[in-house]
Image (cartoon, rainbow, N blue to C red):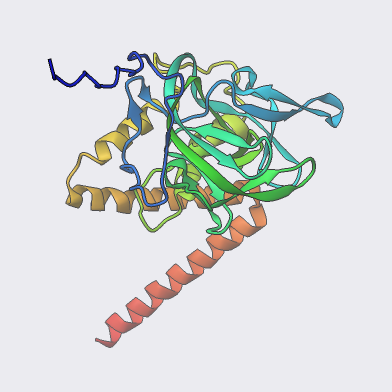
Amino acid sequence: DTTAPDTTAPDTTAPDTMAPDTAAPLTNDEEDRDDSEFLDENGFVLCFPGDATVQVQTSGETNKMISMKNLQIGDMVRVQGNDKYEPVYSFGHKNTYDTAEFMEVETSSSNTKLLLSAQHMVWEVTQEKFIPASEVRRGHVLEVSGKNDSMTAEVTTVRANVRKQGMYAPFTASGTIVVNGIVASSFVAIPILKSVSNQWIAHTGEFPHRFICHYMGSCANNETYDENGINQNWCVIPLQFIDWFFSTSNFVQWILVTLIFTTLSIFSIMEQVLVQPILGLGVIVLGTVMMTSSLSLGIKAKKQL
């Protein structure tokens, strides 16, 4: 028998088991996600996981690190700026038990790895603006917080689809918060006005909520959340509106954008008057003078005709 022996290599394929790490590395040239995508199977994901850490100021001006799941309304939490703290006035999202997919951003600074939802924003130093986590790439520079000041660190790794338990979105007056040592926004990117800062849109649109809960301080004991952990009083309807907005025609969106920008501008002026009365009143007076002058010129031109 001259038949050649069977030299086929034995099957060494490992059994099909679930990998413990579901994160997928991103490449610099990977296409950005759809800006209007806010959902996974657990509903809206606009937040940080429960094991993320924040720095809170306790009595006697000392501070300590606590997990996001232990953060409470009224806690003085570190925000953007040198050793600056602000109270948490509300949670836009608070879900203790469900898991969700997050982006994982790691920097060159030791112990600075941040997980956040894809549309949640971080401060990118070179662009001098907040950008969604889905747009962060290796080489971007983020702001990290030292003991008493702020520094920068380069992004070394960005990974997608990391599943974690808990979904939390604490709100502060400045709209910023330091999480795992990295400066982040309290908000997600809402790409309704393409040429306007996403941070300005979200922060200004949040003004009515901030006015009632922060400036008037009347929300600490009446926060309620739906089955997905979304704040029922202040966030469910706006998120439904955003979802509906992207389903409308371009013409309807154009009309809505005009109304939205006008409303946000009014909110911005109102908060300036509230926070900086002299500056705010100055803006109002200047606007009134300019409007009066325009009307006067129009009337004169009409009379001349």
In this view of the protein, which residue sits in the foreground, 118 or 12?
12
Q: Is residue 165 above or below residue 87?
A: above
Please provide percent x and percent y for residue 139: 53, 53
Q: Name the quarter where the C terminus is drawn.
A: bottom left
Q: Is residue 279 visible?
A: yes
In this view of the protein, which residue sits in the foreground, 223 or 175?
175
Please provide percent x and percent y for residue 142: 59, 48
Please provide percent x and percent y for residue 252: 20, 48
Q: Name the quarter where the N terminus is drawn.
A: top left
In this view of the protein, which residue sits in the foreground, 134 or 186?
134
Please provide percent x and percent y for residue 169: 52, 28
Q: Residue at x 40, y 74 (%)?
A: 294
In this view of the protein, which residue sits in the foreground, 228 or 166?
166
Q: Is residue 232 visible?
A: no
In the image, 45: left or right of 10? right
Q: Residue at x 64, y 17 (%)?
A: 70
Q: How many marks?
A: 0
Identity of the residue furthest to the bottom in this view = 304
Q: Residue at x 21, y 18 (%)?
A: 6
Q: Residue at x 54, y 67 (%)?
A: 286
Quadrant of the rendered image containing residue 242: top left
